[in-house]
Image (tube, coloured by chain):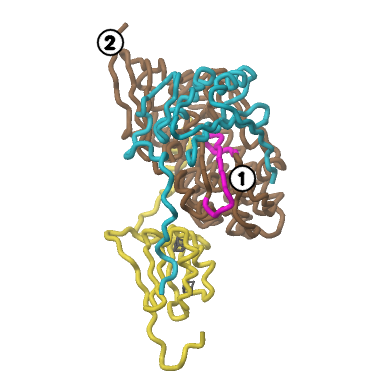
Amino acid sequence: MMIEEQFWETLDRAALPARVGTLAKEGWRLVQICGSCHEAFEILYSFDKDDRFLSLRVAFSKDDPVLPSITESYFGAFSYENEMQDLFGLKLTGLKLNFNGNFYRLAKKNPFLDTPPAVAPAPGGVSS
Amino acid sequence: MPHLVIAKLLTKSAARKPSTRLYPAEKRAPPKGARGRLVMKQIETCVFCGVCGKKCPTRAIAVKRTDKTWELDRLKCIVCGECVEICPKDCLAMEGEHATAFVAKKIETHVQKPKPAASDPT
Amino acid sequence: MGQRTIIPFGPQHPVLPEPIHLDLVMEDEKVVEAIPSIGFIHRGLEKMAEKKDFQEMAYIAERICGICSFIHSMGYCQAIEALLKLEIPKRAEYLRVIWSEMSRIHSHLLWLGLTADAFGFESLFMHSWRVREKLLDLIEETSGGRVIFGVCKVGGVRRDVDAETLRRALEALAALEAEYREIAGVFSRDASVKRRMTGIGVLPKEDARALGAVGPTLRGSGVAWDARRLQYAVYGELDWAPITEEAGDCQARCLVRIREIFQSFDLIRQAAGKISDGPVAVKVPGNPRGEYFARLEQPRGEVVYYVKGNGTKNLQRFRVRTPTFANLPPLLKILQGCELSDVPVIVLTIDPCISCAER
Ligand code: SF4
Ligand code: SF4
């Protein structure tokens, strides 16, 4: 199997819109945006151009859940950003199509925000 | 633009016997190797090691060594066959026929009868 | 300007196999804007990876979707194998390709049926599914499951297909292909089918690219991007090229899928011809550490798996970006300005899989 070479860049969230803007001009395709939240927020933006795969990493503290939107350069990013907004309770600034937390209809608000409880001992298995 | 391109297909299928079966009167024989449902084939040889329950990704099996029981929650079982592959005593088997629908949740319990007086070889 | 009304479309609607809700802002018979809301079947499967053993997670990954099930587990396993730097046996790679092409055919046939149903061509719907049913039997014979294959695991595949079964499967596939050819002819030539699809829901090339469309939605607009070009598994050793159509309308997206089914039949034949003997799985060495994006081509388009492991048996983050999620923005774009009666057909031509999109 071929393991694809992947490129990474870490940057500050303030620098994000400008960097993404350049990528958009160079003709990169937005592949995905992935949010994750453990000790801090970590958002990954992946792009693809001519079979090169580049991911930008933006990390920031949980106390300040604000992120600039990239819908200026990639309008299609609105679905990912609204998803993050609903699942993680992030606040996106400058989001061009903002559902204000109504994109996902969820039973629980921001379900992905809290860290999971420690692994509970699973039932089943052997007991004596 | 051509109309009724489907006509040929329709005439053909009108001449043929139906593609469907009169289930449940007529049942399909499941192909060899199909994973339909898990069965406890022989509780007599089970040594209650509990490997099947540990390997089961959905924790559908509970093994109680003291009571010599082997329990299956069929609604949890995803019929993956991991337990069948791992069982050292070849107690479990996969049948091709699917389990039927349920009206109520229940746990299937298999109890090993106490062995005749002779001591247990294992 | 006429008066605007809002018509709710879904979550329960005859053409929708799964729940998605669209608020259609109408001006007379024209759709001005479509506003989606999803989440009716959000199951939090991504979060589950943080509690489940990474090897058991392959079964859950497979259940993200009931139609493109096999490729989901395959993508998950590939991502983990990349983290573990695990080289899996060649035979397993070939079997994975054969099964993923089978699942592509079965998914596209399902789609053809649903689309025929969406424009009211019931008999065509039945015939598509009649052929699909035979394929499901073949899948069951080779893998053991009809829709959920359950054969992919980290390190290879769980069962081998013996030469005799493979030979019989190939024969059956050849017969199926002949039957399918008749159905394909109806889709590509019949006047009533054409009338419902030609010129409807046009997605220009630039928009498809800019809005991040993937799969047949993208290729129907003339962009030759297919994730199989990354040559994962053994796609690099097979002879094939992405299929594109230029028009960008519903008909073009339909033609792409029709031709892809023929291509899949061919890929299965090629793979079965080249498959070599050998083991089908290797032992998994330890726990995954690091992060990786695996990209594969689902019947509905490119799917991305992100896995991040920290050396324990639970993953830290598992993320799936499914094709339908990427195809939502293009869908909203092509719904703008269409007729109300065309909405069902247009929604179906992106092949929406909502449980994929929400996970
Ligand atoms: S693995 Fe086999 S022998 Fe062990 S408890 Fe399960 S059924 Fe019994
Ligand atoms: S078949 Fe799979 S899910 Fe069912 S009991 Fe066995 S291991 Fe568990």
Label drawn at residue B27: none
Instruction: Say which colour chain C has.
Output: brown
Q: Residues within 10 Å of mark 1 (few under 14, many from 20)?
A: some
Can you give x and y, in whole percent of width and height, for residue B44 in the image? 44, 81
Instruction: Say which colour chain A has.
Output: cyan
Instruction: Say which colour chain B has.
Output: yellow
Of C297 and C186, the residue lying toward us = C297
**In this picture, which residue range is highlighted in magenta?**
C295-314
Q: Is residue C231 left or right of residue C105?
A: right
Residue C69 vertical position relative to residue A88 in the rendered view, above or below: below
Label drawn at residue C3: 2
Q: Residues within 10 Å of mark 2 (few under 14, many from 20)?
A: few
Of C313 and C196, the residue lying toward us = C313
Q: Tag 1: residue type?
A: Gly
Can you give x and y, in whole percent of width and height, for residue A53 in the image? 64, 32
N-terminal of the pair, mark 1 or mark 2, is 2
Can you give x and y, in whole percent of width and height, for residue A20 in the image? 58, 22
